[in-house]
Structures are given as C-alpha cells and as structure tokens.
Image (cartoon, coloured by chain):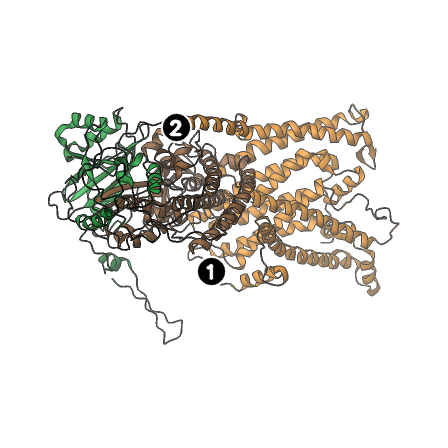
Chain colours: A green, B brown, C orange
Amino acid sequence: MTDETNDKPPGDEAENPQGKEVGKDEERTSPPKTSGSEQERPSESLSVEPGPSEPDSKAQPAVASSEKPTPPKAAPTAGSKPTAGEKPAVAKKGPVITSDIAGDFLIDRIRERFGDAITEAVATLGQQIVRVKKESYVELCHFLRDDEEAAFDMCTDLTAIHWPDKKGEEFDIVLFLYSLPKNRRLRVKVAIADGEACSTVATIWAGANWMEREVFDMFGVRFEGHPDLRRILLPPDWPGHPLRKEYPIGYQDNEWTDKHIQYREIDYDTSLIDVKYAERR
Amino acid sequence: MQEQSSATGQETLFDAEEMVLNMGPQHPSTHGVLRVILKLDGETVVGLDCDIGYLHRGVEKIAESDTYAMITPYWDRLDYVAAVSNDLCYVEGVEKLIQVEVPKRAEYLRVILTELQRIASHLLWLGTHAMDIGAVTVLLYAFREREEILKIFEDFIGARLTAHAFRIGGLWWDVYPEFETRVRDFLQILPGRIEEYETLLNANRIWLQRTVGIGVLPAEEAINLSLTGPGLRGSGVKYDVRKAQPYSAYSDFEFEIPIGENGDTYDRYLCRMEEIKQSALIIEQALDGLPEGPVMAKVPKVLKPPAGEVYHSIEGPKGELGVYLVSDGTGKPYRMRIRPPSYINLQSLKRMSIGHLVADVVALIGTIDIVLGEVDR
Amino acid sequence: MQGILATLMFVAPDWVVSLTRERRPNAFWAEYVLWPVIQILIVLFVILTLVAYLVYLERKVSAFIQARLGPMRVGPWGLLQPAADGLKLLLKEDIIPLKADRVVFALAPIISVVAALVVLAVIPWGAAWATIANINIGLLFILAVSSVGVLGLVLAGWASNSKYSLLGALRSSAQMVSYEIGLGLSIIGALMFARTLSMSGIVEAQQADHVWYVFFQPLGFLVYLISALGETNRAPFDLPEAESELVAGYHTEYSGFRWALFFMAEYSSMIVTAAIAVTLFLGGWMLPGVTGTSLFGIGPIQNSTLHTFASVAVFGLKVMLLIYAYMWFRWTWPRYRYDQLMELGWKWLIPAGLANIVLTGIFYVLALPPARGGVFDLMREVSGRLVPTGKGVGYFILTGTAITVPLVWLLLVNINRRSRDFNLHDQRQLQVNLRRERLEKALQPQPSDGGTQ
C-alpha cells in the first residue's frame, strides 16, 4: 500500500484545542471508507483545477495558529469540531486528493489484462475509478463480471456527465459496480464523443437497462445493442435532451406543449349553456 | 422486444388472442402516477411495460443551478414517504466531499430519526399493500402508528411528510426535551401493534394464498437486475448497506438483517415486518447511548466544496439510495446524480409478473414498494 | 284467479277479517287481496329502510373496526346519513353512455332489484301472519327467483357498451352461479330433517324437534355461509367489485339512483341469504322458551299478536347478527383472486356439500325405525313427520360433528397446498437460525482493500 506521510501541513486538519476530542473522533471515524491509498499528492486526473487553491490558502493561517500534531493516519478523516468560542474553522480543508492506485491486487490484474486500454486508475476519497477506452469497454465489463477475483455482480448505477468543453470526449459514461462476494465497489468511466454511440452493458447486467434508457433520454447518448432504447421519463416525442449543459432550465415554450395542449374558450357574458370550443393547432 | 404501448385494433371482444390492458396513471393501486401496460392472454400476463415519467420534475437539472444547501429539500420530495432518510444520503454525501466530521450526538440523532422514518415508511407500505390485496383494515391501523411518528417529527422538524431534518454538517437544532420520552413511549406500544398486524396477516389463509409463490425472484436474477433493499433480501441475498459499508453511527449498534428464503411476496413481507422490529431495537440502543455535545459541525455558510467526485449510498427503506456528486469547486454541483432505488427496482416488475394473473400484478407493484417521486425524480 | 289466489295460503288475523265482514264486502277480497297488500307494503317499507340503514351500519361497523368513527355529521351519530345519501342519489344527473342500449341499460337494475325483493314474500318473518305467502315450495322459490338476479347483472354489463364492464359482469355472474350450486347443496341436509320446502314448515319442524338444525348440520351451515358470501359478492369474494382491480365491474357506468338500485339489490340479497340461514339452521323466529302461549314460562298468554311481534323481533335479531358477521368478515380478511375463488367454489364447496348430503342420508336412514328399514330406531312418527327422540337428537348431533370435522380438516389442509409443509412457527425458527448463521459469518472481517466507500 502507499505510505501515508503528509508533507504539506495538514490542510484538512482540525484545529482543536481539545486533544482528546480529536482523538476520539479519529478513532471513531477511520472506518473502512477512507483507508488506503490516497493522501500522497494531488493528481491531475481531474480536469477542473483552480477551485481548491483559494480556500486552501485561507485555511493555512487558521490552521497554523493552533498546531496540533495529529497522527498521520488521521489526516484524511479529521474534521472541524464546533467548539465554544473558537474562531470559526473552515470545514473544508483542502482539495480532494486523488492519486494513482498502486499495489492494489484487482487493479493490477485489470491493468495486466487490458494494458493501454485503461487510461487511468485513480482513487479519491477512498473510491476507485478506472477509466477505459471505448473500444475495450464491453470487454472490461465482461471481465469484471465474470472474473472470480473481480466478481462485480451488481451494477449499482450508470449515468453520464456532460463536459461541453472537452471536444471529442463530451460525455463521460460512469458505471458504478459493486461486488457482493468481495464487498467492494468500482467506478468505470468511458469517454464518448457527441454523436457517438456507446456499447451497452444491459446484456451483461440486466439492471442497467433502464439506467441506459435514462441516459439516452437525458443526454442523447445512444447505446448500441440495447434491447429497447427509447425515452423513459419524457414523452416519446419530446425534443431535446434536458441534462445537457446547453439545455436551458427556465420556462420554455416548446413545440411539444403546443402540440399537445388543448385550449377551450368559454364565453362568460352569455349564459352558461353557450360554450365555445376552440382547439389550437 | 418492444411492447406496443397502444391498444391493438380489434374487431370484436373475442377476436384478438392477446388483449392489451392499460392500468392507467390514475389507478387506486399504482401508488402514484404509474402506467402499466399489460398484454394479457385471458387473465395471464404475457407482457408488461411500464410508462413512467408523469412525476418527472427534473431534480438533477435543478441541482446544477442551486447551491448545495438549497438542494437538500428537493431530496425530501423524492421518496416523499420517507423524507428524512433521503436527506441523510445527500448530506452525508456532501459531508464526504467536504470531508467534515459530524458530531457524535448529531450522528446518533440522525440514526434515530432515520430509523423512525424507516418504520413509518414500512408501515405505509404495509397498509397500502394489504389494502391492495383486500385487507383494508390494516391500512387504517398502520396509519394510526405512522401518525405517532409523524407527530414526533412535526414537533422536531416542523413538517410531517416532507421533513427537512438534516443539514450539511449535522442538525440545525437539538431535539426538544420531550423527544426522548415520546420516542420511548412510541417504542413501547409498537411491538403490540406489530403483533396485531401479524395476527391479522401472517397465518391468514387468504393472505398466504395471495402472497406465497407470487413473484418469485431467484437470488442471481435479483442481483443481476440491480434489485436492492428488502426485495433483494427476500430473495436470500445478504446485502444491507448498513452492514456492508456502515455509515453514520450504524457500526455502534447491534442489529440483525432479516433474510428471506424463497424470494416471493410473502418473504418480502416478512422481511419488512422484521425490519420494523430491528429498527425499533436500533432506536432503543441509540437512545440509550445518546451522547451530549453539539449537533452541528462548523460548515461555512457559502459552501464551496473542492473539486472532486464522490458516491455515497445509504440503506433507505426502499433500497440502496445513492448520490453521486461531481463538484467543480464552485458553490453549485456540476452534476448530481440520484441513484433511485424505486426506479431500479421497478425493472424487476416485468420479470416477476410474466406468467402470473392480472390480480397478482397489483400485489407485485405493492411488494416492490415504489414511490413515484423517486421513480421519476 | 280465485284458484291462484287460493293457493297463496296464508292466514289473516281474525280481526282483519272481522273488520271487513261487518261491512259485508267480499271476505275473499279482505283475506286474499287487501291484507296481503298491507303486508307487502309493510315488508317493503321495513326492508327498504333496513337496506338503507344497513349501508349506514356497514359504515359504522367498518369504522369501529378500523379505529375511527364513521358518519357522525348528518343527524345525531350520523343517523340521517342514509337519508342524505338517498336524496343525493335521487338528485344526481342521469348519465347513460352514448352508445349504450338505453332500454336494457334502464332495465338491468330493475331486474336485479325486483328479483331480490320478490323473494321477501316467502320468508317467514315471524309466527302466524307475519309471512306474506307461506307456499309449500318456499325454498325452491327463493333459489329460483334469486337466480334471476344474475340476469340483471349480465344485462348491465352488456348494456354499458364497455369491454371492461362486460368482462366484469361475466366474472361476477360466473361467480354467483358457481356459488349458487354450493348454496343449494348445503341446504339439502337440513331439509332431510325438515321434510318440507315450506319456509314456515321448516321453522315449525325445528320447533317440533326442539333443536336448531345447525347442531345437526354444522358442515351444512359452514358451506352455506361461505356460499352465501360468494353468492352476494361479499367479503373475501368481492374481487369483481373491488376498487383496486383492473376490470371495473358491471356497475361502472351506472350513477345516481340506478347504481343505488344495484346496491339495494346486493344488500337485499344479503338480508335474504341471512334470513334463509336463520330459517334453516338457526331456528327461524323460534326461541327456546317462547311459544304461542307462554313466554319463558310466563303464561298462558292469549295475545297472539304480541307473540307474532316477539317472533319478528327474534328473527330480526338473528338476521342482524349474521349480517354483522358478514361485515366483520369483509373488513378483516383480504380478498381471494378470481381463480382461487372459483377453485374454492367448485373444488371444495360443492364436493363438501355432496359429501354432506350422502353422509347425512346414510346416518338418517340408519336411525329410522326398523319398520322403515332403519337400524337404530331413534325416530318416531308424529303427525306425519319423523321426529327424532331424545337419544335421536344426541345421535344426530354426534353424527353432524363426525361429518364436519374430517371434511373441514381436509379442506383446511389441502386448500393451500403449501400449508401442508408450511408450518409458520417452524419457518420462522428456521429463518431466525439461518439469519444468525449469516450474521456470524458477516461479522468476520471482510477482505476490503481500497475499493470500499
């Protein structure tokens, strides 16, 4: 595993004069979730950079003022404690550390089998993400389901993220897997260009059927080989795909509403029996 | 194979071999606006298609233009029957992203409220499921107990149904002084009432005939269909997120997870009844061990989590409720994905009901336990 | 005309006849026309009011079972609720579907209601003159005429011009017809003892035998009760009219007073089946201790009118107890699926009824005096009827139980095939043990390196 030295002053460190409370929390809150392989250095696998630096700098002086050397393993999990009369500590202490996975048995096995098709394998906040090229996506999924060491028999979720700035790789299809026998989770990402079709995993995990339909509905990403690809949440003749970034969120007068709505004009100045019907379009 | 969603043209009633029946959006037993299109051969179901989306409100889209704290009330409205546990999933996800520690007292209170909400959700499920199968009285009894829980919520949170109990970082207020007594009083009467329901239904011949052997789902198929929650446990699969990946304070408590044997409706019913009892145990343990202390961590008013992504899931009453947050460092999430258990569980309706009779479809919709707010979001 | 009316043998009280005799009109008209019309009007008025108040009673009973109060607003304790409902239904818009057959649409509820109400003429509401028409084939008449009600059902489904109404009507009518067979078979056992089809005759037979036939025929009573529930589309057999079912039922397209007529038909047939059960099995208007001349030993009472009124009250009380039981069943039990319903009727109730007839017959013949070919000689002949002796009564009670117990056991064990190997207690123990094992296994540390959350 990776060793957990932190060189930088603990950006996510609690400033807490009451030492025992910190200790108590840390014991309690180093559950399996954040064991393992992170906390080395921030990696560049996430494309959005500039955010964290600003609050980080703000955090530094606050932290520096009350040094509390904490055991290294506590680094990822410490949080701020609301204490009476202290200057308010900033809760979010630092960037989300993402690091390459090394030494993990399963990831090594995957890398060994697929080589370059795995463009990256990182861990963040205790969760492992593997990015694979589109061509090997289905093969990887078959491997993950059928291999005894992987044994990812449940597909927890399948969704997409739209990155309009990344030309050629606009959609990230994210597949969340869970292995019941091994009790571990994995996230698989594959980048799809706008207009390209992704291959389906609904034939591998039947539960992915409606998930892919929803991705198609909301993003417009087609899935090749899907048994029944049609819109699920929106009406079948709805134009556009709402979760794309260019789709506006405000009220819109669209053709679908105009086509399906019926107006009826009622004449109020004559007696009630005089009712005129008028249908628009 | 695509089911046709419109009725086939038929000359007379008895011409077509298969009849397409529409269990329309307004129907007393579809628990909301769910449209089920059945293809029938006589009374046997040979094909089924669900038409959903009547309650689609675009919560995931809205989340991209709201700050993190503003999004929390939307989560109540998803599974509006179990609002409090929905909140837990989201706030814990955000807390994971911003890496903040929630005070212990807040965690215990969260567990108490979530488990109370689980009991309330299961009671509503019991009432509506039994009513669909014909035992109307159980509905009234179950709501009597649910009323108690909702009163407790109302005095603490201010709302009964869409109760926004949790905030990012803990709870906004501490509980009122009589909270513990009231919860304990409720836990006193609960076992007797559960006994009532079990006497009415567990060994009732008619209930057995309507639920035993209906909708059998073997374990491997259930896992492959991504079924989670009591549906999966009824098929014999031991998977409960509270035990597999404990969150909040669940690792401090001792409780069992009921696992079924045969994967039919009766086993799922027994699982949920047992879960109510286990929830009562958890609440008692939490009340006994409730620590003193603050209930809110220091979280900035303008919350800007660092760039990153996180997936967090909890065991909601309907199944594994999850949130996937992608943050770009600003105050609004870049993408928020809700992993809706009802939506994903509903896929198994088709698998379970083919081969059964029309009257069983109603029982199966009840046993999957869907809430349309979550299915459609 | 005279002959027809003469066969409607009933007895008007003397004072009515004497009233008219003074004015010297035709006594025939008084006895055979005027008095029956008065009786009919009384019975109709009472029964129709009772039907309206049965709805109220159902709402109240269901409310109390469900821990709530029921109608409370209209009148004290909601007692005027039926009046309000009736008024509302009368004033509603009369909607007939566009392409429906108007004549048949209007006729169907009338047929249902008439068939249900005509039967009331032969029910022995009390002693002496409290029966409108004491015909000697009363029971057969009831079964025949109430079957006509099914026609109203089918016509309603047909005339609604809706696929689903028709299917619902067909299902309802199939169910009613199936359970009528069970009904008919279950009463034959009691008729063996009564030896007459006349309803008053059956009550008098029970009086002469000094026993209610439910003790002789417990199985017959049970089968009758279940068949009656199925016949009237009530309680666990109300699938055709359940709200949560897909197929809407024959009365979907009906609104306003036409629907109220169907409802009245259903509740009247509930009263009728309860009344038959009371007559056949529970002693009719007879109460031990109340005879024509004495009241619990207080007597002799010469006032036959008081006796008649008392007998009507007793009958009414018994019928209401049964109807309360019907309501109790409805709000306690879930409902059967349609195929389970038909299976129950055809595969279990009809064979049980047949078995009841055969076994009762065997035991009856065995108890006859040797002169008639019997063995045990536990009956004697009294005024043309065979009446069991004291020991005979005990014998028949014993045989009745002996028939009932094994057949009921067979029914209960086999009706849910899984129940033979489905022992709830064992099942729960098994689950608890398995759970414990799994929990122990789960609490051992899991290999989770990195990929957990």
Q: In the rendered view, does B134 fall on the left or right side of B14?
A: right
- Amino acid type, callout 1: Ile
Q: Is residue A241 above or below residue C443?
A: below
Label disc, if present, on residue C442 of the rendered structure? 2
Q: Which picture quadrant has residue A183?
A: top left
Query: Do badges 1 and 2 share one subunit?
Result: yes
Alpha-carbon neighbours of circle 2 within 10 Å: few (<14), some, or many (≥20)?
few
List x then y, in percent, for residue C85.
56, 60
**Residue name at image x 60 percent, y 47 percent:** C327
Q: In the rendered view, does B329 fall on the left or right side of C141?
A: left
Q: In the rendered view, does C287 fall on the left or right side of A232?
A: right
List x then y, in percent, for residue A75.
26, 39
List x then y, in percent, for residue A110.
19, 27
Q: Nearer the viewer, residue A245 or A227?
A: A245
Q: Nearer the viewer, residue B41 or C105?
A: B41
Alpha-carbon neighbours of circle 1 within 10 Å: few (<14), some, or many (≥20)?
few
Under circle 1, the secondary element is loop
- Amino acid type, callout 2: Ala
Q: How far is the residue under mark 1 from the one under mark 2?
A: 64 Å
Q: Nearer the viewer, residue B5 or C151?
A: B5
The chain containing the residue under callout 2 comes to C
Q: Is residue B341 visible?
A: yes
List x then y, in percent, for residue A196.
14, 41
Q: Is residue A81 above or below residue C226?
A: below
Quadrant of the snapshot with the C terminus of chain A: bottom left
State the count of labels.
2
Q: Earlier in the sequence, mark 1 or mark 2?
A: 1
Under circle 2, the secondary element is helix
Q: Nearer the viewer, residue C158 or C44?
A: C44
The chain containing the residue under callout 1 comes to C
Instruction: List the residue tagged with mark 1.
Output: C95
